[in-house]
Image (cartoon, grey):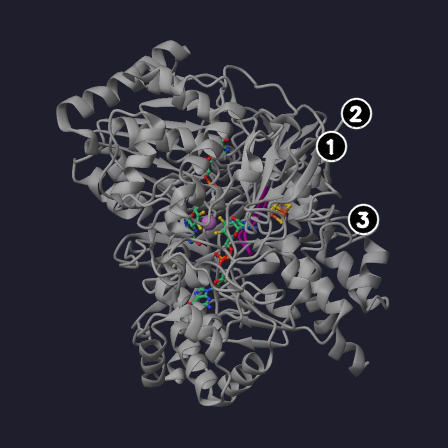
């Protein structure tokens, strides 16, 4: 089997992958981002490339259509809207999961030909505050460092980043560096205790949005204790005095940290030359995200700790091509190649290069405003590509309503059913990862190829092609007459050359005349490049700017503060990762972390459900009682959609308030009230067929044998068999039932002949049984009494919930191994294999061992 060299389609680490058409997936040992490693999501890619659920042909109004009809319709609707209502009456909402070539073509069509800048991207929800912070400080959106700096740093500060789960391969790289050189210190700044904290020497449990107060305090400390690099500042930095004055006027304890915690952090940071500050959504997704970014950049600029080996600020990008989108002008307020819409010379250069009839003259609508304009009826035609805003935007139900309000909506996706696709007039089937060719840029400015190793299924077409075909039908065939992605890439590189007179950071000249087919991963401007060690910033005078930052007054809610984010084994709205049974088994339903004190006050028992309500809407989650969240705070993942749950979409609750500078929404700061769901019954089902999440509480997930569902209802049904049929989706079958009138326990097995088609268990309290065992039985010939027992026979121990997704190792198996003396992560790996592939579960293994320790000592 020949393996194709490509790049992982998930996070911004940008790992190299060797992939085969039979689903073989290996880490690419030669890729400088991962040197052969992959995380659980990357390793499971082979499980997500089957064609189930795929959109394989265009659809118009839910009916299959041919490409010509669909493309004609999209083009005519956009042209008509532009003609009748002007260019700003149409909009594209695109994605950091588009390839650079797709992004380039979409951007060219909207900004240069339609003549509006109403093209924004989900990177607005992700990277906009970092972009704004970089532009304010550096004059352009530059990430100064490279991954190899992590191995050279003496202190790594992870701010608002759950690196262990969200950038796992990078995290393992940090962990390995620390193991090899224990003097390397790691500090984690997060209001929550996460798996990332497990390698940290210090966890600063900051108050939400306390970051600017924390870093302002650091700046004041650096000044007070003589740690400023006066020469660097004099030569390369403006705004020092004003920034310092504002820092000195602010109150570091507004961060929620004690003076001794602050002091320890400040001393360590001040006393370590090689310090890297890595940050992501805990910083960016905030009303003061850009200010948080600048408060961090201020400290690096004041000390000249930037762009040198082992030191600098490092914004970790989320999506595989978040960085590519920033480069190619995917945001509504940028032009391609880091050029500015506001600058007439830049506009002229781009228009001249494109030979386009027009060019947008002002920034377009940013994501939240864009959907507000949809709600207000100002947008007449909308095209969503490679993103699922009906789930991932704040006020997700309001956004769904807004999309419904747009007279014409096209959605390009790889899946037939998504919450956003369900609202479209036209669905356009895109080729997905493994089927298409192009490039992506990772967090360290490295451009890598994604390569096809599978044929394009059905009628699917690559995104750049779909966009070009529409452009041609709108009258611009010549400007969009690309033979393939190599053509598009070459044009993009040529634009960088044409714009080189503006002396921007973005210089793609190493890719001029590149052999696209055989291109190897390479950074711009070139490998191992760093920016700013010797100044040379991109403001007009060549200097950087420190900004005076005023921290916000500490958040004080009367209800709960709702923090949101990611889990280890799912990717965003789960359209792909949700297909892999392995990935679904780590955390199989929408949950909310609740502090034990709050749980007691709310009267929450084991496995209870919690209903949350905000001004925007409601949602219900399984309560996970843990001191990982502080009192008064909740944390819920962003992943569950209406396809996978009846009420688990967290963005139904989040208010769309934004950072005034970047337009990025404050997705980590929901304001909710909470109440225990007074369910009359709880159920669990394992079925051989896909179930619909229809009950007041319902969440479905893929399993090795079909599907599983967690459900709950407010009123006990009178006919349990009918209920079991509805929940499991098995309408016709023979039935075995066991009812316990005393406990209210109901167990139902549905058969087709001897084959167990589904199992349904319900109880008046949250159902306690081995899910894994029930799941293992469906689809097999298991006798009713065994099937209904609800637990495994003594000779088949239940492995418990999955901890290691790569090798499907369960909690019970691990506990047994620990009890039998495996008391290091390595020893556990030897006995059970857990943690020996991607390593993403190592923090959980360590926690398990630490937990077991006191008990062992007591023995
Ligand atoms: N497994 C997985 N990995 C992913 C993704 C995924 O969907 N699944 N998505 C990718 C994408 S697009 C992105 S953007 C990245 C995101 O990667 P991360 O930013 O690491 O992930 P999040 O879980 O969104 O948030 C990080 C942390 O911010 C903390 N936080 C919340 N409020 C604050 C605050 O006020 N201050 C501070 N200091 N911290 C705060 C949260 O508690 C959370 O632990 O992950 C990428 N990688
Ligand atoms: N509450 C809360 N909300 C958040 C966040 C948070 O932390 N908290 N994080 C935000 C962030 S950082 C991000 S990046 C967003 C992510 O949110 P989204 O971008 O909405 O999430 P995805 O599920 O990645 O959506 C990608 C879509 O593109 C489709 N797709 C996959 N490959 C292709 C392709 O090649 N072509 C096309 N046309 N389609 C394809 C997938 O099937 C899927 O429907 O969510 C944001 N929303
Ligand atoms: S860390 Fe995991 S998700 Fe991110 S690029 Fe690497 S393999 Fe893919
Ligand atoms: Mo993101």
> Which residue is labeled 1 in the image?
24
Report if residue 693 is visible in the image: yes
Q: Residue 166 in the image: state x and y as whole percent.
A: 56, 54
Q: Nearer the viewer, residue 738 or 772?
A: 772
Report if residue 714 is visible in the image: no
Distance from Cα at disc 1 to Cα at disc 3: 30 Å
The secondary structure type at the circle numbered 1 is loop
> Which residue is labeled 2 in the image?
1
Q: Is residue 393 above or below residue 200?
A: above
Q: At 30% from the left edge and 31% from the top edge, which residue is drawn?
A: 351
Magenta: main secondary structure equals strand
> Which residue is labeled 3 in the image?
796
Q: Residue 167 in the image: state x and y as whole percent.
A: 59, 54
* Earlier-in-chain disc, 1 versus 3: 1
Confirm or deny contact between disc 1 and disc 3 (CB under 8 A).
no
Magenta residue check for 777: no
Relative placement, left or right, of 556 versus 229 is left
Q: Residue 379 in the image: state x and y as whole percent.
A: 21, 34
Q: Is residue 412 above or below residue 815?
A: above
Distance from Cα at disc 2 to Cα at disc 1: 9 Å
Which span is picked out in magenta? 738-747
Confirm or deny contact between disc 2 and disc 1 (CB under 8 A).
yes
* Earlier-in-chain disc, 2 versus 1: 2
């Amino acid at each position: 089997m020949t393996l194709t060299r490509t790049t992982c389609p998930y996070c911004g680490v940008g790992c190299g992958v060797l992939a085969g058409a039979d689903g073989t997936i290996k880490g690419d040992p030669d890729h400088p981002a991962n040197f052969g490693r992959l995380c659980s999501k990357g390793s499971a890619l082979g499980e997500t490339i089957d064609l189930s659920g795929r959109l394989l042909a265009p659809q118009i109004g839910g009916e299959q259509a041919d490409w010509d009809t669909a493309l004609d319709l999209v083009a005519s609707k956009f042209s008509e809207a532009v003609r009748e209502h002007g260019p700003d009456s149409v909009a594209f909402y695109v994605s950091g999961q588009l390839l650079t070539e797709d992004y380039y073509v979409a951007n060219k069509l909207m900004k240069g030909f339609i003549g509006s800048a109403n093209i924004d991207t989900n990177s607005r929800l992700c990277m906009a505050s970092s972009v704004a912070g970089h532009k304010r400080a550096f004059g352009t959106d530059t990430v100064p460092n490279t991954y190899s700096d992590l191995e050279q740093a003496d202190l790594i500060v992870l701010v608002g980043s759950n690196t262990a789960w969200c950038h796992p391969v990078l995290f393992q790289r940090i962990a390995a560096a620390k193991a090899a050189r224990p003097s390397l210190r790691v500090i984690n700044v997060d209001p929550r205790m996460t798996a990332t904290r497990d390698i940290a020497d210090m966890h600063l449990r900051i108050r939400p949005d306390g970051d600017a107060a924390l870093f302002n305090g650091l700046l004041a400390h650096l000044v007070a204790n003589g740690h400023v690099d006066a020469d660097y500042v004099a030569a390369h930095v403006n705004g020092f005095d004003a920034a310092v004055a504002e820092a000195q006027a602010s109150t570091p304890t507004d961060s929620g940290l004690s003076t001794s915690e602050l002091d320890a952090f400040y001393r360590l940071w001040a006393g370590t030359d090689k310090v890297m500050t890595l940050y992501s959504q805990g910083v960016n997704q905030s009303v003061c995200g850009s200010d948080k970014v600048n408060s961090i950049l201020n400290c690096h600029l004041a000390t000249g700790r930037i762009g040198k080996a082992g030191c600098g600020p490092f914004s970790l990008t989320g999506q595989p091509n978040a960085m590519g989108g920033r480069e190619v002008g995917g945001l509504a307020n940028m032009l391609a190649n880091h050029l500015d819409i506001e600058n007439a010379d830049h506009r002229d250069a781009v228009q001249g290069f494109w030979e386009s009839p027009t060019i947008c003259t002002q920034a377009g609508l940013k994501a939240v405003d864009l959907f507000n304009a949809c709600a207000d009826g100002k947008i007449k035609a909308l095209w969503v590509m490679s993103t699922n805003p009906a789930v991932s935007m704040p006020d997700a139900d309001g956004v769904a309503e807004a999309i419904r309000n747009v007279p014409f909506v096209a959605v390009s996706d790889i899946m037939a059913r998504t919450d956003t696709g369900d609202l479209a007039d036209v669905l356009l089937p895109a080729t997905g990862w493994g089927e298409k060719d192009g490039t992506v840029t990772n967090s360290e400015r490295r451009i890598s190829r994604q390569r096809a190793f599978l044929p394009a299924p059905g009628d699917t077409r690559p995104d750049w092609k779909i966009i070009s075909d529409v452009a041609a039908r709108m009258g611009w065939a010549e400007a969009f007459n690309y033979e393939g992605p190599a053509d598009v890439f070459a044009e993009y590189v040529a634009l960088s050359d044409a714009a080189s007179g503006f002396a921007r950071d973005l210089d793609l000249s190493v890719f001029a005349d590149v052999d696209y087919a055989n291109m190897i991963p390479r950074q711009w401007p070139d490998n191992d490049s760093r920016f700013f060690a010797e100044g040379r910033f991109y403001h007009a005078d060549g200097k950087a700017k420190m900004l005076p930052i005023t921290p916000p007054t500490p958040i004080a809610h009367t209800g709960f503060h709702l923090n949101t984010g990611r889990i280890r084994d799912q990717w965003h709205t789960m359209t792909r990762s949700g297909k892999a049974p392995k990935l679904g088994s780590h955390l199989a339903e929408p949950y909310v972390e609740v502090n034990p004190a709050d749980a007691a006050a709310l009267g929450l028992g084991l496995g209870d459900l919690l209903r949350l309500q905000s001004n925007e809407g409601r949602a219900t989650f399984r309560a996970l009682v843990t001191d990982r969240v502080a009192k008064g705070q909740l944390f819920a993942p962003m992943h569950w959609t209406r396809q996978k749950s009846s009420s688990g979409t967290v963005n139904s609750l989040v208010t769309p308030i934004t950072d005034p500078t970047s337009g990025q929404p404050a997705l980590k700061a929901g304001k909710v009230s909470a109440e225990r769901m007074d369910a009359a019954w709880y159920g669990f089902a394992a079925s051989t067929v896909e179930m619909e999440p229809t009950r007041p509480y319902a969440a479905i997930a893929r399993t090795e044998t079909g599907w599983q569902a967690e459900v709950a209802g407010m009123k006990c049904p009178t006919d349990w068999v009918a209920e079991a049929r509805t929940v499991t989706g098995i309408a016709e079958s023979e039935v075995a039932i066991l009812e316990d009138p005393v406990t209210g326990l109901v167990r139902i097995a549905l058969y087709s002949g001897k084959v167990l088609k589904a199992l349904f268990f319900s109880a008046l309290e949250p159902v306690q049984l081995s899910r894994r065992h029930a799941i293992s039985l469906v689809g097999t010939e298991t006798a009713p009494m065994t099937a209904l027992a609800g637990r495994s026979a003594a000779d088949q121990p239940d492995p418990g919930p999955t901890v290691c997704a790569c090798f499907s190792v369960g909690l019970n198996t691990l506990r047994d191994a620990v009890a039998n003396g495996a008391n290091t992560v390595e020893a556990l790996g030897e006995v059970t294999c857990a943690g020996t592939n991607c390593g993403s579960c190592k923090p959980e293994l360590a926690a398990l061992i630490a937990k077991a320790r006191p008990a062992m000592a007591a023995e």
